[in-house]
Amino acid sequence: MYTPNPIYTGDVVLPGALLSLTEKIASNVHDVWAVGRISEGWTYGPVRNNEKKITPLLVPYSELPDSEKEYDRNTALETLKLIIKLGYKIV
């Protein structure tokens, strides 16, 4: 049985410059996801349909609902925090 065990990053405080980078990374995360979906044959549609490969999320990041943006933001934020936690410097 798989038990997720992410590295704890709750103690990492990102400087303001990196916090502002989070939104740019989140947008790029969405674009990378969208390119992958499109290459798999998915298209835009108002209601998700896995059989027909239709999703309402194939829109620009700026048009996503806040709940979807939050998923991408969290991915970006946790990636930046992990980089710092592992001892790397972003300069």
Image (tube, helix red, strand yellow):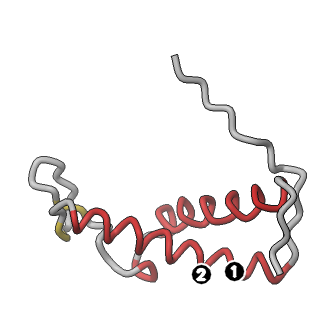
The correct choice, above or below, for 67 with respect to 17 in the image is: above
* Front residue of 4 and 72: 4
Q: Is 86 left, or right, of 52 in this rendering?
A: right
Q: Are marks 2 and 1 in contact (CB under 8 Å)?
A: yes
Measuring from the top left, give residue 23's x and y in whole percent: 62, 78
Q: Tell me the SS state at disc 2.
A: helix
Measuring from the top left, give residue 66's x and y in whole percent: 51, 69
Measuring from the top left, give residue 91's x and y in whole percent: 83, 81
Q: Is 36 left, or right, of 40 in this rendering?
A: right
Label 1: which residue? 21
Q: Residue at x 51, y 77 (%)?
A: 27
Measuring from the top left, give residue 56's x and y in whole percent: 26, 66
Q: Which residue is drawn at 9% across and 54% down?
A: 52
Q: Residue at x 67, y 74 (%)?
A: 22
Can you name the residue that lies furthest to the front here? 88
Quarter-wise, where is residue 18 in the image? bottom right
Q: Residue at x 75, y 55 (%)?
A: 82
The correct choice, above or below, for 26 with respect to 16 in the image is: above
* Front residue of 54 and 4: 4
Which amino acid type is shown beneath numbered disc 1?
Leu
Label 2: which residue? 24
Alpha carbon of mark 2 to alpha carbon of mark 1: how far? Answer: 5 Å
Which amino acid type is shown beneath numbered disc 2?
Lys
Label 1 crowding class (10 Å Cα cut-off): few <14, some 14-19, many 20+?
Answer: few
